[in-house]
Amino acid sequence: MRREAFESSELIKTEADLESFRLKYLGRKSALNQLLRSLKDLPEAERKQAAPAAQKLKKELEETVSFKKKEFLTEINESAVDITRPGLKPRPGHLHPLTQVEDEIKKIFSSLNFGIVEGSEIETERYNFDALNMPANHPAREMQDTFWLKERSKSGDERLLRTQTSAVQVRYMESHEPPFQIIAPGKVFRYEATDASHETNFYQVEGLMVGRNVNLANLKFIVSEFFKKLFGPDTEFRFRPSYFPFTEPSLEVDIRLKTDKKGNANLKTLAQSRRSEWLEVMGAGMVHPRVFEAAHYNPRDWQGFAFGVSLDRLTMIKYGIPDIRLFHSGDLRFINQF
């Protein structure tokens, strides 16, 4: 049986031949398996002699089948792959455009001696509203559709997904003594309908400077330096009076990117239709005394300014992106442009 099996193995040329060989010598109805099943009927002396030989033969045949399979796989792989063909260059990953602009903003404010502070995306009602001069009946709460959470905090406060990163600033003031200047970048959430300029989650960068003699002139300088570094030295500014419950007085900041006589903006990627427009980009103002009192600061001793800007909006302006929903679409045709 052994001699016959190994003579047959030399004639295997295809995978079909191999399968026929396996069934003939290792299959359920093969002569070898019939021999193994009949060992129990042999006299003890013959069984002791035949059993090891039969098991050895079975192992050798299994190894032969395994070896032949590897030979066929190697031949298939070698025929399918041209090893002389140049390989494909791997495409490296890169940062999302929002991350790129956020990193640039952090570098700009670090150069202006601002620290960078982050906080939790789940906040309490006190830090998101009450400490920012927005008590339960304040009309400003109606401007922010909030995602409320069912479970309260350990202290019994209502919890929510933060609608602004101002809560980070309040927590920072509670644990730090002025003077200081910080920015608080991060994701915020608002329950509203999505369209080309609105999303349920987006990114903000809020800033805060507190000191003995901080005033609006300091605010205007910091804001102007920031936008000039981000969009170019020819950026124009316009400051308009506004209202925010946590600042008094409050300002809206508009920018206009400088164009040449032919109407070309310094930023070639900016959408042509937006180059000469005034664009509302920031809310700002002097910190309201009640916010200082909530953080246990004496408003007679300390003054400060705060500002907030949408990171998504700045990125859209910088790169001429028409729809905010593209940032989270997962469309590689969009992402791979940056």
Image (cartoon, helix red, strand yellow):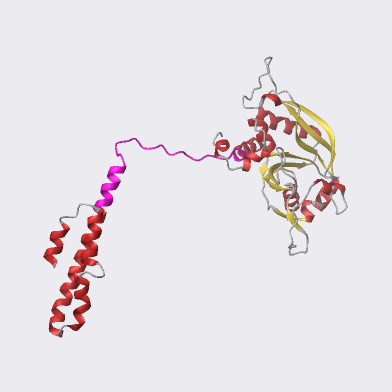
Of residue 96 and residue 107, the one placed in the foreground of this image is: 96
Within the magenta stretch, is there residue 273?
A: no
Q: Which residue is drawn at 68% across and 35% down?
A: 314
Q: Which residue is drawn at 11% across and 64% down?
A: 3
Farthest bottom residue in view: 43
Quarter of the figure that contains the C terminus: top right
Question: Would you place residue 20 above or below residue 257 in this image?
Answer: below
- Picture quadrant where residue 112 is located: top right
Is residue 113 at all visible to an observer of this figure? no
Is residue 24 at all visible to an observer of this figure? yes
In this picture, residue 295 sits left or right of residue 273: right
Whole-percent x and y of residue 65? 23, 60
Within the magenta stretch, is there residue 92?
A: yes
In this picture, residue 284 sits left or right of residue 335: right
Whole-percent x and y of residue 252? 80, 34
Whole-percent x and y of residue 134? 84, 50
Whole-percent x and y of residue 170? 76, 50
Q: Residue at x 83, y 38 (%)?
A: 250
Of residue 65 and residue 197, the one placed in the foreground of this image is: 65
How many discs mark residues in the rendered view?
A: 0
Farthest top residue in view: 261
Which range is magenta?
A: 71-99
Q: Residue at x 69, y 20 (%)?
A: 259
Question: Would you place residue 40 above or below residue 134 in this image?
Answer: below
In this picture, residue 314 sits left or right of residue 142: left
Quarter of the figure that contains the N terminus: bottom left
Farthest left residue in view: 3
Question: Would you place residue 223 above or below residue 150 in this image?
Answer: above
- Picture quadrant where residue 273 is located: top right
In this picture, residue 318 sits left or right of residue 94: right
Question: Would you place residue 45 above or below residue 124 in this image?
Answer: below
Of residue 174 and residue 336, the one placed in the foreground of this image is: 336
